[in-house]
Each structure stands twice: as structure tokens, then as C-alpha cells.
Image (cartoon, helix red, strand yellow):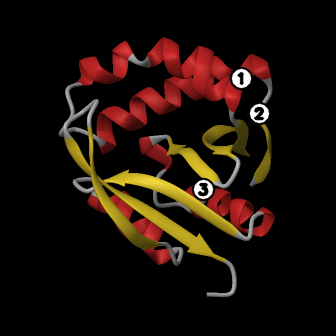
Amino acid sequence: MKIRKAKEAELDRLIEIWLESSFQAHDFIDQEYWEENREVMRNLYLPLSENFVVIEGTIKGFLSMMGKEIAALFILPSEQGIGFGKALMQYAQEKNNEIYLNVYAQNERAKAFYQSQDFQIVEKSLDAATNEIEYRMHWESGR
């Protein structure tokens, strides 16, 4: 397993992973929402982020950081539970003293994953775009 910075030529692959994973992880949100945000993700969010890919033969997932914020962590649904997400998270934790992220309350699997990586819920809010409750989570090294 190898982790490295994503190349610009790989952004379309990251979008495919994001979309497939979003459909599965966020089945409580209409798929149309994710389709409508494809271009914004491709042309705004990913270019503004520092993106890292996890590779084992092919790209299995990615992590996007914006400063101390995890903007995205997505693993192909067929590759989840193998350790790719954990490897990306540990990579981010090695490079940062603290990290923040948001996760939908209904995404129990992701919330449990982040808690297993020592993230704590620090805030609860309503995501206006989806009308879904989300949690703000925080991790700090040495805690």
C-alpha cells in the first residue's frame, strides 16, 4: 500500500470514487444532490485541497485536506474495511497536530470510524444544503 499526493490527471478518478462512495455512504440524501455537485467538486474543492491517494495496484481511495480540515475521505465501496481509510487517516495525523472534519449524523459507519481514530464530536449543526444533521469532529495529537 502506497500513499502519495494525487496528480492533476487523477482528479477525474477521484470524482468517480467520491460519487460512488457518496451514493453508498449517504443513501439518505438524493443521488441527484451528488450529481449536481460533481463539477463543483472537480473544479473547486479538489483543486483547492491537498489531495492524497492510497494505491494498491490502482487508486483505492483518497483524502483531501484544506489546512487542518479533512474535506474528504473516500474509499471505493468494494475496498472498504481493508485498511485504506485507516492508512490515509494515520498519514494525515502524522502530518498534523490537530484535525477537524464534518460527518453526517446518519452516516453511522463513518462516525464510528472517526471515533475509532480518536476523533471527538465537538458540535452538532444542520447542513443547510442537505437539511441533514452533521457533527463537527476534532482530533488532537497526544490527547
Q: CA distance from mark 3 to mark 1?
A: 18 Å
Query: Which numbered tag is attached to residue 84?
Result: 3
The C terminus sits in image quarter: bottom right
In the displayed structure, would residue 59 be above or below residue 11?
Answer: below
In the displayed structure, would residue 135 be above or below residue 129?
Answer: below
- Give the residue displayed 63% in from the left and 61% down from the top: 89
Mark 2 residue type: Ala
Mark 1 residue type: Glu
Residue 104 rendering spot, x and y as whole percentages: 30, 51
The N terminus sits in image quarter: bottom right
Which quadrant of the figure has residue 59? top right
Q: Are marks 1 and 2 in contact (CB under 8 Å)?
A: yes
- Give the residue displayed 19% in from the left and 37% down from the top: 131
Q: Nearer the viewer, mark 2 or mark 3?
A: 2
Residues 4 and 98: in front is 98
- Decide if residue 63 is on the left or right side of residue 5: left
Residues 11 and 137: in front is 137
Does label 2 or label 3 sit earlier along the sequence?
Answer: 2
Does label 3 or label 1 sit earlier along the sequence?
Answer: 1
- Decide if residue 132 is on the left or right side of residue 68: left
- Give the labeled residue for mark 2: 6
Mark 3 residue type: Phe
- Give the residue displayed 24% in from the left and 33% down from the top: 130
Residue 55 rendering spot, x and y as whole percentages: 72, 44
Tag 3, which secondary structure? helix
Residue 23 rendering spot, x and y as whole percentages: 31, 32
Residue 62 rendering spot, x and y as whole percentages: 62, 42
- Give the labeled residue for mark 1: 10
